Image (cartoon, grey):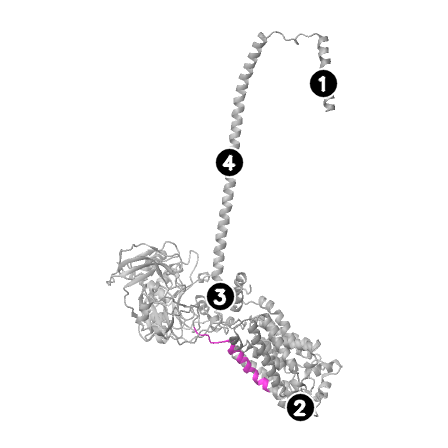
């Protein structure tokens, strides 16, 4: 049965360089003497250490737990002693250190007791998700988003389609291809678990048509299963078909809404390697402690895929691939389109390390950037249907409002635009810069808002305090007045009584005064004297 | 363990497969068939124009880069100044005096290009700004085209004429020049002649498609332009929109009035139509950059070409049409932003 396929706008046909790392089967990388396990190997909050320096840990033992929803625990990847909990350089473009747990291996590689899930189908999806969460599984395709969240569609969402992404569209990388070739059963069994967790109706395993062997192997493996709801689909080899949104478009013709998630249109996409990790967690009780890493590039003599304990230094892997150190220009983590140059090669492999690409010195050199001539070649290859030339213009001018009008945040940073740019402008760098600036501004604004709110609360509190104070004072005054009034009345009565008593006493004792018994004529004389005095006084007033 | 001389840069890490230089060189190569036809029909004057215009353009580019304190070699190496000089040279009449060419090329590079910020920042097509300035300032010199098929000046005589204005003994200036088909048609229509009368009077002026000789020049420029479309150096949208719109609008007017309105073939294959559609309108810096915008931009150019040729004061109109649409480009781009992936409707 062939499935109808759609296509997405733009994209590139790139040289694959994949065969070079597929000559040898996947081999186990040497067990490192010391593993460095970053607490943040995923998107979300860093895990919180729960071991102490000097403590002995077993392989598979949880050493840091997830304290928030979007987070993932970290497990010891071999048995040994914790020798440090602190900052170490991690694989990040900045080359900056981040919190890690360092374990000195004892060489015994002794497992903790594992508890496989006997009958996952009888388990509730949420219990299943919890097992997957506790196994520390994150998206192994490169993003590192905690997988259990993408297995939790939410209460009223129906998952019509679960897609396993085996596109692996970046040049050079072959870890998923090799996994599909060598471990199809783990992928299919993992898919069945995921399907149960999501209660998905239909499943597709999508593989680019440059991986014929993987396709055949998976189709054959599926025949034993009689799982008619799983379909293996070959898709054209166009970079970036492995992008979640592009893959959905190719397979279904539908577009994930701008700023939306696949679940919004009833779909979930997981990487094939994530499915294998889910299988291991459920059927073997194994947490995510190892992964397949492609070690390739023109600067290694034995490019191949290695099964690597998380925490193994990059340099160990490069040595196993017979690396020509003197001939190396740079080592990338990830593919040439989206990977980044690693500043320090002692950094450890993390859950999202899919490829180490050692590039030789003799490659054509990067040319200086010229001005944009607006030729629009970037827009013709943009799989997100954006206008990279306009995005660049506004990002360059730091016009962060306009750059968002042109849908900066729909950019998936695939690098197609920068690859075709005749002016050699590092376009993706400008978009990352603009995104970071906008995030920083938003954080700043949030901070300012919070400060403003806090200040307003502070003012309000002061105001309230003042009001309360006044109220208290008013009431006190009132009370005082009332009590005084009440007290006064009592006192006054006493005083009056006393005065009356004194008066009466005085009246009784006092002789009649001169003016007491005056005749009418005397009164008139006094009045006349008074009147004259008054006139005189008025006259003085008039003179002065 | 650190690698020495780490050059930290953002992805992608693959070496680029394209460059401005490659694009400009391909455009220059694609001009060559039409250029050879133009030399064939108009004589050595085309070559002299080319040498003077390109020389001036490159010299001015270098001068301006130096004055603006920019890296000279990478920018000279992008060949954009050469292309500007070439486009101007192809547009100038074959009996232009040297100073006309030099002034035009210098104006194009210094004013239209570098005073606006150089490559990538000029809002108007530099070659067309140079051409339009000359047309407005020196209208008489700008009509000095040699007639097609006549005996042209020899290589050295042409040089002497361009540099000194001296003609070989026994040759008159008037015998060497002739009005272009577009000019003749325009002037004659202005004298109330009908097209059949005009074409009867000037039988040697028109061929089966357009102006005699001009039709070949146009066909070969179109051939070069189509090659550029296939090489993905230019988008098909602008030339297609120019040609289709010009065809439609000239048909619309010629159908009811065939004696007074030249046929669409005449419009398409005479004058600078194909050079304009494939090489001038497609200048990426000054053209619209969105898919729908490019169609509007091309259609606008065609409408202005027709309007100015038919009712305007100049026989040909590619330069003014392109400049007018350059003016509209930012607005067109703004209103034609394509729908982003996952968006219901387009636009910011």
Viewer-closest of B189 and B91: B91
Q: Is residue B312 magenta?
A: no
Viewer-closest of A318 and A326: A326
Residue A299, given in percent of the width and then of the height, sits at: 36, 74
Which dot marks residue A534?
Answer: 1
Q: Which segment did they paint magenta?
A: B14-36
The Cα atoms of the two marked residues, 2 and 1, are separated by 138 Å
Please report, as a chain letter, where disc 3 is located.
A
Quick one: label 2, few (<14), some, or many (20+) residues within 10 Å?
A: some
In the rendered structure, which disc, 4 or 3, sits on the residue that comes first in sequence? 3
The Cα atoms of the two marked residues, 4 and 3, are separated by 57 Å
Exactly how many numbered labels are in the figure? 4
Quick one: label 3, few (<14), some, or many (20+) residues within 10 Å?
A: some
In the rendered structure, which disc, 3 or 1, sits on the residue that comes first in sequence? 3
Which dot marks residue A469?
Answer: 4
Residue B30, given in percent of the width and then of the height, sits at: 55, 82
Residue A487, given in percent of the width and then of the height, sits at: 52, 22
CB atoms of marks 4 and 3 within 8 Å:
no
Does mark 1 fall on the same chain as mark 4?
yes
CB atoms of marks 2 and 1 within 8 Å:
no
A253 relative to B162, above or below: above
In the rendered structure, which disc, 4 or 1, sits on the residue that comes first in sequence? 4
Q: What secondary structure is found at the residue carrying circle 2?
A: loop
Q: Taken as a whole, is the magenta stretch helix, strand or loop?
A: helix
Quick one: label 4, few (<14), some, or many (20+) residues within 10 Å?
A: few
Give the image quarter of residue B13: bottom left
Does mark 1 fall on the same chain as mark 3?
yes
Residue A90, given in percent of the width and then of the height, sits at: 36, 62
Residue denoted by label 3: A430
Residue denoted by label 2: B150
């Amino acid at each position: 049965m062939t499935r109808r396929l759609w296509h997405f706008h733009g994209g590139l046909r790139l040289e694959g360089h994949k065969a070079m790392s597929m000559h040898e089967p996947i081999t186990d990388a040497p067990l490192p003497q010391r593993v460095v396990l970053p607490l943040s190997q995923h998107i979300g909050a860093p895990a919180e250490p729960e071991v102490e320096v000097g403590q002995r840990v077993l392989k598979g033992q949880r050493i840091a737990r997830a304290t928030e929803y979007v987070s993932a625990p970290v497990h010891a990847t071999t048995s040994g002693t914790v020798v440090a909990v602190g900052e170490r350089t991690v694989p990040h473009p900045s080359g900056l250190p981040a919190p890690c747990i360092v374990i000195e291996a004892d060489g015994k590689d002794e497992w903790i007791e594992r508890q496989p899930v006997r009958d996952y189908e009888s388990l509730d999806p949420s219990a299943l998700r919890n097992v997957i969460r506790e196994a520390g599984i994150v998206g192994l395709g490169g993003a590192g988003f905690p997988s259990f969240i993408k297995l939790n569609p939410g209460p009223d969402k129906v998952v019509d389609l679960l897609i396993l992404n085996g596109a692996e569209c970046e040049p050079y990388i072959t870890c998923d291809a090799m996994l599909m070739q060598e471990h199809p059963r783990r992928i299919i069994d993992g898919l069945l678990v995921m399907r149960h967790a999501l209660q998905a109706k239909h499943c597709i395993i999508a593989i680019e048509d440059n991986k014929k062997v993987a396709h055949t192997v998976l189709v054959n493996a599926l025949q034993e299963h009689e799982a008619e709801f799983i379909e293996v689909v070959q898709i054209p080899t166009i970079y970036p078909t492995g992008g979640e949104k592009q893959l959905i478009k190719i397979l279904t013709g539908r577009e994930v809404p701008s700023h939306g998630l696949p679940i919004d249109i009833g779909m979930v996409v997981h990487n094939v390697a994530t499915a294998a990790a889910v299988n291991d967690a459920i059927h073997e009780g194994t947490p995510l402690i190892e992964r397949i890493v492609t070690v390739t590039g023109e600067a290694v003599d034995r490019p191949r895929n290695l099964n690597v304990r998380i925490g193994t230094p990059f340099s160990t892997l490069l040595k196993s691939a017979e690396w020509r150190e003197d001939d190396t220009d740079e080592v990338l983590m990830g593919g040439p389109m989206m990977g980044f140059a690693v500043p320090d090669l002692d950094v450890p492999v993390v859950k999202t390390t899919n490829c180490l690409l050692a590039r030789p010195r003799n490659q054509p050199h990067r040319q200086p950037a010229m001005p944009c001539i607006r030729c629009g070649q970037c827009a013709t290859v943009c799989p997100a249907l954006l206008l990279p030339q306009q995005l660049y213009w506004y990002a360059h001018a730091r016009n962060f409002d306009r750059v968002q009008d042109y849908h900066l945040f729909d950019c998936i940073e695939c690098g197609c635009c920068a690859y075709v740019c005749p002016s050699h402008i590092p376009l993706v760098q400008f978009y990352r810069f603009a995104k970071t600036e906008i995030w920083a501004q938003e954080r700043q604004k949030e901070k300012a808002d919070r400060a403003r709110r806090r200040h307003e609360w502070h003012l309000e509190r002061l105001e309230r305090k003042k009001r309360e104070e006044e109220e208290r004072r008013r009431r006190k005054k009132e009370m005082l007045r009332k009590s005084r009034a009440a007290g006064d009345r009592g006192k006054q009565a006493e005083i009056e009584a006393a005065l009356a008593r004194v008066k009466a006493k005085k009246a009784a004792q006092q002789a009649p005064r001169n003016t007491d018994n005056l005749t009418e004529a005397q009164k008139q004389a006094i009045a006349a004297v008074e009147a004259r005095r008054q006139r005189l006084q008025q006259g003085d007033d008039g003179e002065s | 363990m650190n690698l020495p001389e780490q050059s930290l840069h953002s992805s992608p890490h693959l070496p680029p497969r394209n460059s401005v230089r490659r694009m400009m060189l391909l455009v220059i190569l694609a001009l060559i068939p039409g250029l050879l036809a133009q030399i064939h029909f108009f004589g050595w004057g085309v070559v002299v124009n080319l040498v003077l215009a390109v020389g001036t353009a490159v010299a001015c580019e270098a001068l301006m880069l130096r004055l603006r304190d920019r890296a000279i070699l990478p920018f000279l190496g992008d060949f954009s100044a050469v292309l500007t000089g070439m486009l101007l040279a192809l547009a100038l009449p074959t009996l232009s005096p040297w100073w006309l060419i030099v002034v035009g090329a210098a104006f194009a590079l210094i004013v239209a290009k570098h005073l606006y910020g150089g490559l990538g920042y000029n809002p108007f097509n530099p070659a067309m700004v140079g051409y339009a300035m000359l047309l407005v300032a020196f209208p008489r010199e700008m009509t000095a085209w040699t007639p097609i098929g006549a005996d042209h000046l020899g290589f050295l005589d042409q040089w002497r004429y361009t540099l000194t204005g001296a003609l070989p003994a026994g040759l008159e200036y008037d015998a060497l020049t002739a009005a272009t088909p577009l000019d003749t048609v325009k002037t004659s229509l202005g004298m109330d002649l009908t097209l059949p009368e005009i074409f009867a009077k000037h039988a040697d002026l028109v061929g089966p498609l357009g102006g005699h000789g001009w039709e070949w020049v146009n066909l070969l420029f179109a051939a070069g332009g189509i090659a550029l479309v296939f090489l993905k150096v230019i988008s098909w949208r602008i030339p297609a929109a120019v040609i289709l719109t010009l065809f439609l609008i000239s048909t619309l007017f010629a159908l009811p009035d065939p004696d007074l309105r030249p046929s669409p073939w005449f419009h398409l294959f005479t004058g600078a139509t194909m050079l304009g559609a494939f090489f001038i309108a497609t200048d990426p810096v000054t053209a619209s950059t969105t898919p729908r915008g490019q169609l509007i931009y091309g259609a606008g150019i065609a409408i202005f070409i027709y309007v100015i040729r038919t009712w305007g004061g100049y026989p040909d109109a590619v330069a003014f049409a392109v400049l007018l649409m350059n003016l509209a480009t930012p607005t067109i781009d703004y209103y034609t932003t394509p729908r982003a992936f996952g968006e219901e409707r387009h636009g910011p």
